[in-house]
């Protein structure tokens, strides 16, 4: 078993790690629903400067997502 190493990545890239059988848009929509429904995660993401319109997550933001949602 390998441990996922957080790096900066597109939202769709991270989404496909969580939802490998989904089309990129569908996977991204699912991931974002998970993220938006987790208030503690959203508060921490906003503290990093997260904007809903951004296309990429920073490595710090990916770390926060994994901490709250688990490994992809």
Image (cartoon, rainbow, N blue to C red):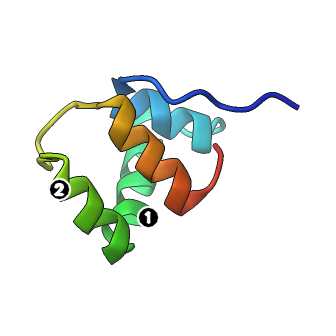
The image shows residue 56, relative to residue 31, as above or below, that is above
Res. 47 mark: 2
1 or 2: tag closer to the N-terminus: 1
Residue at 65% of width from left, 46% of height from top? Answer: 71
* Image location of residue 27, percent across then percent down: 47, 44
Foreground: disc 1 or disc 2: 2
From the viewer's perspective, is 36 left or right of 27? left
> Which secondary structure lies at badge 1?
helix
Residue 19 visible (yes or no): no
Residues under numbered marks 1 and 2 in contact, where contact means CB atoms less than 8 Å apart: no
Task: Give the number of the disc on residue 34.
Answer: 1
Rendered image quadrant of residue 1: top right
Label 1, label 2: how far apart the Cα atoms are:
18 Å
Determine the secondary structure under disc 2: helix
The part of the image, by quadrant, that contains residue 33 is bottom left
User: Residue 52, percent across and down?
Assistant: 15, 50
Is residue 9 left or right of 23 when viewed as pictured? left
Give percent across and percent down for residue 4.
Answer: 65, 31
Q: Residue at x 11, y 42 (%)?
A: 53
The answer to whether 57 is drawn above or below residue 36 in the figure is: above
Q: What is the tally of numbered marks visible in this picture?
A: 2
- Residue at coordinates 42% horizontally, 39% vertically from top-left? 62
Q: Which mark is residue 11?
A: none
Residue shown at 57% from the left, 40% from the top: 22
For this view, does 37 lie left or right of residue 20? left
- Mark 2 surroundings within 10 Å by alpha-carbon count, few (fewer than 14), some (14 through 19), many (20 or more): few
- Residue 42 seen in this snapshot: yes
- Tell me where residue 44 appears, x and y as whole percent: 28, 60
Answer few, some or many: residues within 10 Å of disc 1's Cα (few below 14, many 20 plus, some between 14 and 19): some
Residue 58 horizontal side relative to residue 15, left or right: left
Q: Nearer the viewer, residue 62 or 53?
A: 62
């Amino acid at each position: 078993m390998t441990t996922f190493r957080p790096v900066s990545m597109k939202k769709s890239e991270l989404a496909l790690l969580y939802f490998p059988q989904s089309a990129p848009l569908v996977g991204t929509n699912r991931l974002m629903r998970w993220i938006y429904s987790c208030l503690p995660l959203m508060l921490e993401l906003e503290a990093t400067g997260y904007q809903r319109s951004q296309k990429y997550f920073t490595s710090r933001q990916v770390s926060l997502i994994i901490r709250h949602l688990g490994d992809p």
